[in-house]
Image (cartoon, rainbow, N blue to C red):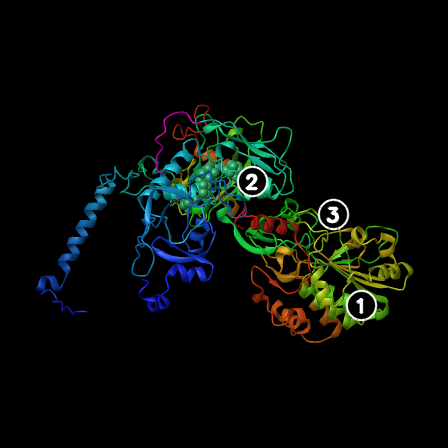
Amino acid sequence: MAVVKLQRPKLNFGEKIYFGALIKGFFLTMTHAVKSLRGKSVGADELASSGLGVTMQFPEQRWDEHLPEYYRGAPTLVTDEQGRERCVSCQLCEFICPPKAIKIVPSEIPSDDPWVKVEKRPLEFEIDMIRCIYCGMCEEVCPEQAIYLRKDYLITGLKRADMVHDKKKLYEIGGTRAGLVNKWNELK
Amino acid sequence: MSDTPSATAELKLPKDLAAEKGLVNVQIDGIWHQFPKGTRMIEACRQAQVIVPHYCYHPKLSSPGNCRMCLVQMGMPPRPAPGQEPQRDENGYEIIGWMPRPVIACANTIGENMGIRTTGELVEKCREGVMEFLLINHPLDCPICDQAGECRLQEQSVQHGRGVSRFVDMKVKKPKNVEIGPRIRLDDERCIMCSRCIRFMDEVASDPVLGFTQRGTHTTLTVHPGRLLDSNYSLNTADICPVGALTSNDFRFQMRVWFLKETPGIDVNCGTGTNITIWTRGNKIHRITPRLNDEVNSAWMPDSHRLNFHYIDGEARLTEPLERGTGILPVSSVPSFSTTTWPAAIASAAAKIKATPAAQTAIIASGRMTNEELFLTRALAAEIGTGQLALVPRFAEADALLIAADRNPNTTGAKLVLGTEDPFAHLDSIREGVRNGSIKSLIVLGDDLITDAGFTTEDLGKLDFLLQTSVLANPTAEQAHIVLPSAAFAEKRGSMVNLAGRLQRLNRAVEPQGQAHDDWEILRDLLLAISGDTNQVHQIEDVFKVLAENVPAFNGLTLSKIGHQGTQIADTGYQIPLLANERARKAAGLING
Ligand code: SF4
Ligand code: SF4
Ligand code: SF4
Ligand code: SF4
Ligand code: FES
């Protein structure tokens, strides 16, 4: 590798004793301190500041309205407009999930169920949120548009077991999504 | 040419060279190969490592040529005009004249100087056309279809399909989720009418219950009215169905195939020794399918054997060494057991065996044990000094295909390893000895004496000591003083010899459940505990090595030399009926084999 020799900048006397720069810096800091006390910090509005500087006081204050459209939060399962479980337990998400966070036990839909023609649905569906890296691969791979990353980012628990989202919890967070997959409807 | 006789004598034409060996020259995708006369084009391509996509063709079944997926371009040398010499290239092959229309590769045989093109615009267009027709009415079922991941239709549509359907009309509806038999479910919308299942039931299982009704796009596979697809070979149709039209009720929706690991093994339900593939995920077996072996089971296996694996992680599985608790009531038929550790169980068993005179000790081994285990059993009998060693015969009705009357998978191996023509001979005298009290200590390896060998609970109650190794809890184990949990066929390695004298290997597909130990390790530990020697045998290979040195039939073999297809080591004259049928059909030219 070529050696590049750097020339140190030539400093004059005022710069060498750096006292001027200190005072300059002091005034800059004070300006911001006063601004922040008066609630006039730059970017305070965009970042939903709590009134003191640009800091948001979490958890009293939430970022939720400011989440961008593409925000990737917790993966969840969704039902369709007729309340049908979209997931058919094809296990593609289980296969693709890089940290192996998903565990599915497939099952056959009993013959007295209104959705018996779909034939298959998950008996158990678990996502271990300690493992999940919010990559969104599961959403991308799903052929039934059944799994979506929602905006929930507050995943907490007191023990490991709390961090495993079971099927019920996943549908609770996921809610309903309309349209998209029509092949199971009566007129396909 | 007639004026240079010497030159022709030296430079023979390729066709003559091939003819000397009974072969013909065929050019496949520009490269010349030689094949035996009468080979099907598709088989020739396969041998030349060129894949021709196909659905209806199966080497073990007749070729109706109805799916048209295997279309290839064919060419033959043009017939020369009278008196004209055929044109040849510099290597002596005649120039091929290519036909403008494709032919099916599965039902046509090769000829001298034939050319086959499996690529090119014509062939590609044909495949795309066939795929488009097949997919017109095909449902969008892949996410719920058990075949996904091993579906030929999926594979070919990735290679030759269009991304989008040009078909705007409503799809034809057909019956879905039909129970056509106790073990098979039919989805007619997924069927591509290849007729493999129909031909299998007719030609191999000799129970022609399947057939097509309707015509054209409405063709529907169905079972004969009033009949069911209930043959003991029905699950083979799910194996050969190239799509997910026929699926196994047992495996249905249990696990996607792409998670499964395949381990080659052999079936231990009868003396045929059907070659199998064990499909596992983690420590769970999800299904068993037959594995191709032209010397044993061809490509098939009976349902009853295929489904006999759920016991491995079932309720009755023994997972811990048990020792009978003290202070049991002598009249109680089910003594209380307490769990113990392996070293304690082995030490206690060895002490009991040593405390009994050899003349009062007997060993009942099992025809379900591997050669290695039987060899160690022989060593154990020698160490104890007893000649009272017998196997339990297990005979039942044979079917006319694969199931043999001898339900012990390793009777032939036992004869070779124990060096006796009748390994069952001593069983009666041992039973008598137990009854009249001359046998006080009994070691039972694997088999259930009460169910299979004519012993009664009272007989076994007379014993001072009964040691049982077993995979499952059973009435004999309930009478035992020590019960050692052993490994099931999918959990251990070893070798067995089938009725026809073929040495084959078991492989470990899953780990033994709980504390269960490999049988050969149990026998070795027991042997060492009795003799007090230090251990020299650390792997099953070591056992096989000693076995190969001591039993002439195994001379020169190692476990790895046996190979996945087995090695013939004895000639017993036993004929597997299904193979005889298949060879007859092959000789008659009905199938390719
Ligand atoms: S978001 Fe990624 S890590 Fe999380 S469950 Fe889906 S695939 Fe797995
Ligand atoms: S990929 Fe979709 S349909 Fe398949 S198991 Fe996952 S969520 Fe269910
Ligand atoms: S048969 Fe094959 S292509 Fe058809 S639904 Fe099943 S997996 Fe998909
Ligand atoms: S069910 Fe399967 S094997 Fe039988 S004809 Fe249809 S596609 Fe072929
Ligand atoms: S494989 Fe040749 S026509 Fe079906």
Residues under numbered marks 2 and 3 in contact, where contact means CB atoms less than 8 Å apart: no
Marks 2 and 3 share the same chain: yes
**Quarter of image, res B486:** bottom right
| Residue at the disc numbered 1 | B353
Q: CA distance from mark 3 to mark 1?
A: 38 Å
Chain containing the residue with disc 1: B
In the figure, B265 relative to A162: above or below? below
Q: Secondary structure at mark 1?
A: helix
Q: In the image, B448: left or right of A21?
A: right
In the figure, B42 relative to B361: above or below? above
Start-end of magenta stretch: B161-171
Chain containing the residue with disc 2: B
Marks 3 and 1 share the same chain: yes
Quick one: B49 or B267, which is closer to the camera?
B49
Q: In the image, B34: left or right of B563?
A: left
Q: Which is closer to the viewer, label 2 or label 3?
A: 2
> Counting residues from the N terminus, which is met first, the one under dot 2 or under dot 1?
2
Residue at the image point whose x is 61% and y is 37% from the top = B208
Q: Secondary structure at mark 3?
A: loop
Chain containing the residue with disc 3: B
**For the stretch drawn in magenta, what is the main secondary structure?**
loop
| Residue at the disc numbered 3 | B397
Q: Which residue type does callout 3 highlight?
A: Glu
